[in-house]
Amino acid sequence: MTQGTYTPPTVWTHEAPSGGQFANINRPVAGPTHDKELPVGKHPLQLYSLGTPNGVKVTILLEELLALGHQGAEYDAWLIRINQGEQFSSGFVAVNPNSKIPALLDRSVAPAQRVFESGAILLYLAEKFGEFLPADPAGRTETLNWLFWQMGAAPYLGGGFGHFYAYAPEKLEYPINRFTMEAKRQLDVLDRRLAESAYLAGEHYSIADIAVWPWYGQLVRGNLYSAAQFLAVHEYTHVQRWAEAIAQRPAVQRGQRVNRTWGDEASQVAERHDAKDLD
């Protein structure tokens, strides 16, 4: 791979790994690579995930629901090692045909309901338990505005900026510049909004904040891609205020630890099957 001009072929073919940290699991087709059933625990909700920003969204919401006393939100969180291709097992593909974490199976209903895509899981749980999603049409709509903003924006931050800045086999000027510009534009969108209100959808914490915080909140706190200085995140003072306020929530602190297998040992809870696992 070079900085020179690349002429795309008439028809692209997958001939060799593209390089980078996740090259060994990237492929141009869907479906399972091997047969393996997913484990099932004792709780109504079965979560199959990893403590990435997308996975953390769901464990934060579940811990928030439990903190409010919703015992039906008890869950088993099973570790899916994406670097080992466990998301391509037949069992996982049956729950999420897109082979991405997180995936949820709700066994409190018959037949059991699968829910995949992190935003869909947040919306499903918020509606199921009647929390963190306003009932009034205006508040609900504003919350969903920001929830879907995150679903559309974060791929530019993760697969765009994060990939080329942190994971690509070579540092290439054009894609880093292109996606840095977009990451900073997105931070400015958030900063302008949070100058107007305490939280993204208004004065109350919601699934919009839970969706956005693991990406952009952690970015400005220096916990994502080691890029805080590069992106000059100190410029986004309202995002920083919001990010620190959410970071202080006990349920957020618990949720971040679930399905985490890296970093400080005290922060790692590879699987969660009972509240005492987080003690």
Image: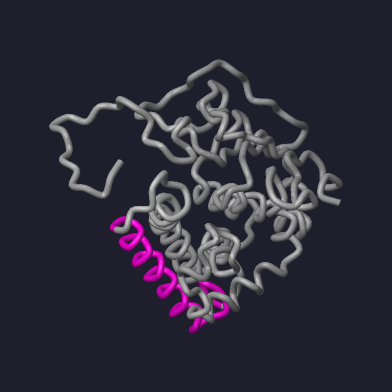
In this rendering, position of residue 102 left or right of residue 170:
right
Image coordinates of residue 125 in percent, x first then y, are: 60, 50
Range drawn in magenta: 174-202
Is the residue 241 above or below the residue 9 in the image? Answer: below
Q: Please provide percent x and percent y for residue 62.
A: 68, 51
Q: Is residue 261 magenta?
A: no
Q: Is residue 183 magenta?
A: yes
Q: Is residue 134 visible?
A: no
Which one is nearer the viewer's eye here, 132 or 275? 275
The residue at the far bottom in this view is 196
Residue at image position (63%, 47%) is 51
Q: Can you see residue 3?
A: yes
Question: Residue 73, image x and y in percent?
Answer: 71, 47
Q: Is residue 246 left or right of residue 250?
A: left
Name which quarter of the figure residue 156 lies in.
bottom left
Q: Residue furthest left?
A: 10
User: Looking at the image, how many numbered discs can be counted on the residues?
Assistant: 0
State left or right for residue 181 relative to residue 100: left
Q: Quadrant of residue 91?
A: top right
Instruction: Tell me the colour scheme of the image.
Output: one colour
Q: Nearer the viewer, residue 79 or 74?
A: 79
Which quadrant does the N terminus fall into? top left
